[in-house]
Image: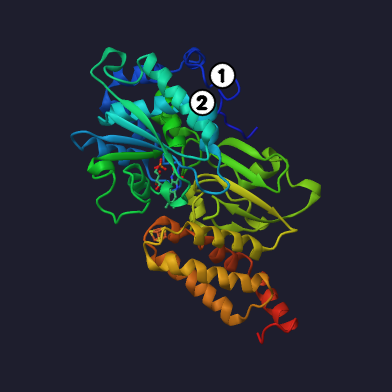
Amino acid sequence: MIEYKELTKKFGKIDPLSINDYLQQDGYKMIRKAIKMGPKKILNEISLSRITGRGGAGFPVSIKMKSFANETGVKYIICNADEGEPGNFKDRYLMENDPHQIIEGMLISAFSTGASRGFIYIRSEYQNAINIMKHTIKEARKYLFLGENILKTSFSFDIEIRRGAGAYVCGEEFALIESIEGKPGRTRVKPPFPSQKGVFGLPTLINNVETFSNLPFIMRIGGREYNNIGSDFASGTKLISLSGNVKNKGLYEVSYGETIKDVIYILGGGIPNNRQIKMVQLGGACGVVIPQSLLDIQIDNERFHIFDSKIGAGALIVIDDRHDIFDIILRNMEFFEHESCGKCTPCREGHGQMVNLVKKFVNFQATKKDYLSLKSLANVIHETSLCGLGQTSPSSIISTMEFFPEDYEKRIEESVRRGQTNG
Ligand SMILES: Cc1cc2nc3c(=O)[nH]c(=O)nc-3n(C[C@H](O)[C@H](O)[C@H](O)COP(=O)(O)O)c2cc1C
Ligand code: SF4
């Protein structure tokens, strides 16, 4: 069986609204263990685990934590639960099914780095998750896992919920910080990084929901053992949000190194009505689109470098052979045109132009010149945008030009044949 349930193993077995259920499953034992170990040893275990962030960028968690731990004064921890990337729903599942695991992860992080205040930033569409997290924080306070002098030590830490207002860019760390500060969600130029100057100008450590959920697990089995799970390049497990034209859509936890094909065909049960896969989009709307012939690739960020991409937050969107690549690209570009915050020119102006060009392919009005304009525009936006939104949004165009060149050629030929262009 390719599933490796660790972060999801309590799903359906505990009542998420009951702290007693969590305690009965050894809940909050790892923060006790962590307090006995002390910050240095915890950070060493996290370093040995080689865990990378699960929110998209895949940055080594221990590097960020260590640099944050070196900062002094009042410090904040933020759990990024914005989850705006289309196709991803893992953080919602984690919040709705095992919320105390997230709080325990945040406690381990706060204790080892000297932070005393925390936020969980949740997108407002996730009303159920917001209710559950609010209840969970109340319960954790009642049982003295949050607040002053946690477990009768000098360690104090508390958490507030902040809701996002639905902007995709607010998942980006600086836009999220601005949003918490009550400003429009727009990124900032780095450096300084959030760990130096974050929310309200104070050092801030931001990690994803899934990243925090891993910390109790690392404390339990130790960093070395954790590093033995997964592939040569990526340790631990990854939550995969599987959607699209696949029989068993849903959330799956696998160790890094499993192939995309096995996730789709073994866990997902394959494609309904014996159809073929036309393409799979990796990571979400900002991810690359690959053909059936490349599905043997293993899930880990190192291997995805051959696509100049990452597994991101872990969405796999399966699209069968009834679908046209240009329809898919158009939806992606319309989404990014709508979500651009407007701060930098390539992203603000470029998405609308890409939408117009892609529409020509959709409507059989495309010329070779349109193809070249689209290619050049996609590369300019990718290379010159200020934040990750514009840097990654053209991925579906760049990758389909590489992996589906015949679709572009045929569409231009067909446009000429229909007499709607001169080629
Ligand atoms: C446009 C954009 C949207 C993002 N959305 C999210 C998000 O919804 N959730 C998330 O955890 N990270 C998101 N990120 C990544 C964050 O900026 C940041 O890298 C992440 O929260 C760090 O946590 P990690 O190291 O645990 O992955 C986004 C980045 C960009 C550029
Ligand atoms: S890339 Fe787009 S979303 Fe990011 S700062 Fe520029 S305009 Fe805003």
Q: Residues within 10 Å of mark 1 (few under 14, many from 20)?
A: some
> In the picture, residue 68 is in which quadrant?
top left
Asked if marks 1 and 2 touch (Cβ < 8 Å), the reply is: yes
Q: What mark, if any, has residue 14 been given in the picture?
A: 1
The amino acid on which the numbered mark 2 sits, given as a three-letter code, is: Asp
Q: Position of residue 80 (x, y in %)?
A: 41, 39
Q: Nearer the viewer, residue 100 or 131?
A: 131
Is 406 displayed left or right of 198 in the figure? Answer: right
> In the picture, residue 88 is in which quadrant?
top right
> In the picture, residue 190 is in which quadrant?
bottom left
Q: Nearer the viewer, residue 316 or 3?
A: 316
Vertically, is 370 above or below 63?
Answer: below
Q: Residues within 10 Å of mark 2 (few under 14, many from 20)?
A: many
Q: Residue placed at 44% from the left, 57% from the top?
A: 389
Q: Position of residue 97 (x, y in %)?
A: 55, 27
Give the number of marks.
Answer: 2
Q: Residue placed at 51% from the left, 51% from the top?
A: 303
Single out the residue that lies furthest toward the bottom. Answer: 422
Q: Position of residue 14 (x, y in %)?
A: 56, 19
Can residue 113 be seen here? yes
Single out the residue that lies furthest toward the left. Answer: 72
Is 323 displayed left or right of 394 in the figure? Answer: right
Q: Quadrant of the N terminus?
A: top right
User: SS of the residue at dot 2?
Assistant: loop
Vertically, is 273 above or below 235?
Answer: below
Marks 1 and 2, the one that precedes in the sequence:
1
Can residue 108 be seen here? no
Is 365 displayed left or right of 60 in the figure? Answer: right
Vertically, is 411 above or below 218?
Answer: below
Single out the residue that lies furthest toward the right. Answer: 273
Identify residue for label 2. 98
Q: For the residues marked 1 and 2, what is the alpha-carbon distance in whole angstroms?
A: 8 Å
